[in-house]
Amino acid sequence: MVRGGGRPLDYRLNAVLAEHYRGSIATGENLFSLQDAQNLIRYGGMRPDRDYLQFDPALSYGLTEYLRTQEMLAQHGWSSRRCIPHGGHQFSLHIAAALKLGGNESYPGEFQPTGGFADDAVVEDSYVGLTEMPGIGFEGKAKFYEVLRALHA
């Protein structure tokens, strides 16, 4: 799988790469709007049978815009299973589960205290499930709670 290399809005470069590379391409983590996503699909040479889209819902104007992007992708023959949100945070993990996406990029030890998984999350064979706690996962992170509590004091 190929990731990165060119500028995010250089759709022609992406199309040339896709034309010459038979493996999977994963991209889109630096695109932030429905229009950016549409341009990638229209002009970037992305192939719905093998490539992966990594739009980050938190940076892409939230869940509403991400849902619009999902609708556009479906209209262009893309399966939601080809979407693996970038970000590594709890928001994307919950969206990936709710929308039955292909997964979620995660960095368990990075971006603390907000990054990673809830304290009671179980990682097994490189998979993590959602906890039973309501919310999007930040609520189950004791160190993040400590930061919020100190800010409120």
Image (spheres, rainbow, N blue to C red):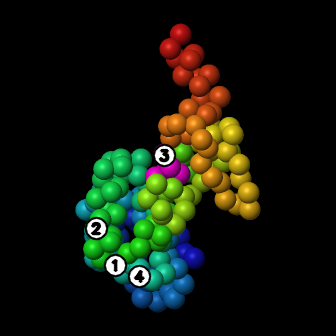
How far apart are the two marked residues, 1 and 3, measured between alpha carbons? 26 Å
Image position, residue 86 (x, y; %): 50, 57
Indicate which label's residue lies in the foreground, 3 or 4. Answer: 3
Relative to 44, is 112 above or below?
above
Q: What type is the residue that disc 2 sits on?
A: Met
Image position, residue 2 (x, y; %): 55, 75
How far apart are the two marked residues, 3 and 4, measured between alpha carbons? 27 Å
Q: Residues within 10 Å of mark 2 (few under 14, many from 20)?
A: some
Query: Helix, strand or loop at disc 3?
Result: helix
Q: In this picture, which residue range is highlighted in magenta?
A: 91-95
Instruction: Determine whether label 2 and label 1 are within 8 Å by CB.
Output: no
Q: Residue at x 68, y 38 (%)?
A: 119
Instruction: Determine whether label 1 and label 3 are within 8 Å by CB.
Output: no
How far apart are the two marked residues, 2 and 1, measured between alpha carbons? 9 Å
Of labels 2 and 4, earlier in sequence is: 4
- Please give the residue where the numbered disc 4 appears in the rendered image: 47
- Most frequent secondary structure within the magenta stretch: helix
- Please give the residue where the numbered disc 1 appears in the rendered image: 77
Query: Looking at the image, which residue sits at the far top?
Result: 153
Of labels 1 and 3, earlier in sequence is: 1
How far apart are the two marked residues, 3 and 2, measured between alpha carbons? 21 Å
